[in-house]
Image (cartoon, rainbow, N blue to C red):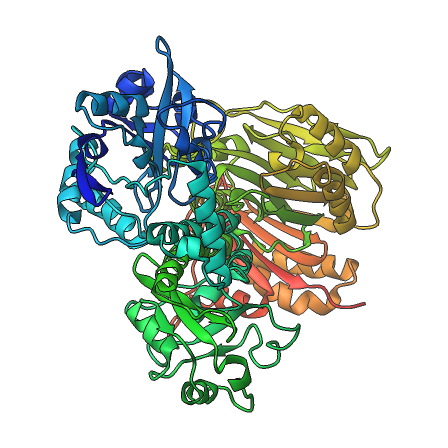
Amino acid sequence: MDRGTERDGAVTEHAAAGRIPLAVVVVDREGLVSHWSSGARRLFGAAKDEAIGRPAVDLLPVSGALPEDEDISPYGAYAAYDGLGHDLESSLDGRLFYPAAGRARLTVPERDRVDVLWWAYPLVGPGPERLLVLGADVGRLQQDDDDDGEDPGFDRVAPGFALHTDFPGAEELARGLPEILPSMSVQEGARIVGQILELGYPVLEFSQNDRVPVTPDWGVPRRVERKARRERAARAAAEGLPLPQEYADDGEDLEYAAVRERLEFLNEVSGRIGTSLDLSRTIIEVSKAVVPRFTDVAGTYLREQVVAGEGFPDGVPDTTTMWHRVAVEHTDEPGRWDDVVPVGEAMPFPAHTPFFQCMTSGEPVLVPRISEEMGHAIASQFEKRDIRPLITGRSMLVVPLKARNVVLGFMILLRHPERPVFNDMDRVTGAELAARAGLVLDNARMYTYQESVAETLQDSMLPHIPPRMAGCDIATRYLPGTLLGRVGGDWFDSVKLPGARTALVVGDVMGHGLNSAAMMGQLRTAVQTMAALDLPPAQLLRNLDDLAQRLGDTYLATCLYAVYDPIASELHIANAGHIPPVLVRADDGRSELLDLPTGAPIGVGGVPFEAVRVRVEPGDRIVMCTDGLVEVRGEDIGVGLATLCESAAHPAASMDDACDTIIRALNTRGGRKDDVALLMSRLNGIAPEDVAEWRLSLDPVEVPRARAVVREQLRDWGLGKLADSVELMVSELVTNAVRHSHSRPVELRLIRGDTLLCEVDDDDHDLPTLLNAGPGDESGRGLRVVSTLAREWGTSRTSAGKTVRFELTLPRR
């Protein structure tokens, strides 16, 4: 598209201004080049196959504008744009989230220094693309123009931004984008074009070969004096002062100054908002950015669901939609607005108000002066509060905060009566401001929502472990990461096993975010299921690795699985690529990292796992954690492991205090970014005198013998009050075991600890289930009796058959 420029009352066509050979580069969300046009090859000197997949900052080293004192004739007046945009590197590394433009010099291999104009457009959407970068060789423009014999007018070709988007060729442009980006569909091209149009940036065809969105020139003054005059005119217009006669006849200067002033304001606002993905902080940034430069009062309202981090129904808001006042920034005396319109209040808005019109139409609403009648209508919403003195006579602009055509909220902007009223240009500026703020708020909202979902998912998957298990005490800690997307895949668990044993588990899915938390949940569930089958530690990790292979090769995980036998006083441990546990000895207080076969992470596949047995004594403690606790960037992990050993050995009054000591010692070093799971268990053991075992032959006469030995043992333990109930339940379990066993004797075991545990083992692999026995049935009532009388009961398979167990609460002494 050729663009003419007006000069001395005539219109002169500049072919060069409409035919700029462009370098077109697309950068993905990892900062890598995903598209490199032939124009980029010519301008930057790198071939396409060399550029694709490389960091964009290595290929586009454009930073800073040209120095004002550098002789770049005939473009010397271009120094007026030195302060317009940020450097391109800020866009490439993700520090900018709005379109930027600039001009700079770079050195290209085998060529002289190249004078480059560049534009950068952020791309928002579900695709991998993050940034569209355009570049043009200014020297080439000069050459083309000289060939045409025209007066050089290249000071008229400059990066800039327009404030409105009346462009009829959007559909054609959308169809043309796939020609320069072969991997892009027509629908994706339409999305990018629609985004640029919605945000308020014009689209023109500026290329011989490539059709892409670019920004036109604003017209750069040729003389420094003219630049100074326009700046003075802009200040006079902003302050509402009468324009001196020397400027009054220069309509072009005044228009330029007004546009330039608003452009600088928008660039300044864009640089001040979006520094954080925290929703509350973003709201404050948006409010403070417009007061007092653009308005005297700024009230921000958001949908109730946005504040709560929830989704909301499709369609436009209505009179039942609740809006939360989340910020009020003003230049009035302190406290004047606080009582009348307090932050945090939620309210709907009637259909007759300008606020309702704004949020349903999605367009700004301008009220030059709030009349007494309108002030009364607005004030009627506030019960027992008279807001009229705060708003009547002021100029008001209501702008929607929307993103992706969804209204998230709106801002009410008010100017004092003595200040110039909002005009149509202010309406356009306010719309542009709201569009940028809306995208920033939506990014914060979506991040908050995803983080909330991930945290909820993770919290639901982390177990609530009882502080006491058979023969051991347990304490745990979980700390989220300190980076964005801090939810991770770390977990801990404990599982009750037959024989009063306990399985202790700590694992870490590599990565962060919702997917890692979901993968963690699947692996944790699998570990619980396989632990209930009483699989040996090495075999359990082998099965877990096979499962991870079936789930996909996207994620890897480390896992440490230990089985504590309090009767045998030993740990049976297997490791899958995890950091080793620390064992703290009770007799002398020394601590040591257990020397275990490392193993490969879960998901690698094809690697054997080994298990070792470690003798322990009552009172010893085992500390298991994930690497996020001991690993700090820039520091050897051995330092963290040494600190872990030292802090774990520190005396503590309780298990919780011991965990807190470890966290304080390791979490205050700084630099931790990953999440942390910590599990500590004090291995108390079970004394031999608290365990009684009998072997029963497969003969029904053994049932009354079982009842007799159990009654006698309970009397010896001083638990005679439980004898009747235990005798009845033991009779039912032993009867079933004798009836269904095949060859091995039945084993009966009583264990006295915090509870009374009774276990019956046999060699039948079929697990019993509860039955609904009818009045005439001769069997099927045994487990119903056990279920009714026991505090807890359960069954599990063993390598030799199965175990049926029940527990009873010990009577108070």
Expressed as whole percent of the image width and height from the top left, the position of residue 673 reads 59, 38
Q: Name the quarter where the C terminus is drawn.
A: bottom right
Is 293 left or right of 500, judged from the image as shown?
A: left
- Seen in the picture, residue 48 relative to 303 is either above or below; the reply is above
Query: Based on the displayed image, in which of its 4 quarters is residue 593 positioned?
Result: top right
Residue 739 seen in the figure = no
Image-based side of 421 in relation to 721, left or right: left
Instruction: Find residue 5 and report its horizontal and vertical position in percent.
Output: 23, 41
Q: How many marks?
A: 0
Inspect this view and state whether residue 64 appears. yes
Where is 312 relative to 124, above or below?
below
| 4 relative position to 87: left or right | left
Q: What x and y, as percent, mark residue 659? A: 73, 45
Please identify the residue farthest to the right as the structure is shown: 588
Give 719 or 547, whichever is nearer the viewer. Answer: 547
Check the image and name the residue furthest to the front. 245
In this view, the residue farthest toward the top is 110
Write the residue at 45% across / 85% down: 375
**Which of 316 and 360 lies nearest the eye of the viewer?**
360
Residue at horizontal 31%, vertical 29%? 135
Quarter of the picture containing the N terminus is top left
- Image coordinates of residue 623 in percent, x first then y, are 69, 38
Considering depth in this image, is 99 or 17 the residue closer to the camera? Answer: 17
**Residue at (41% x, 86% y) in the render:** 374
Left or right of 61 in this view: 21: left
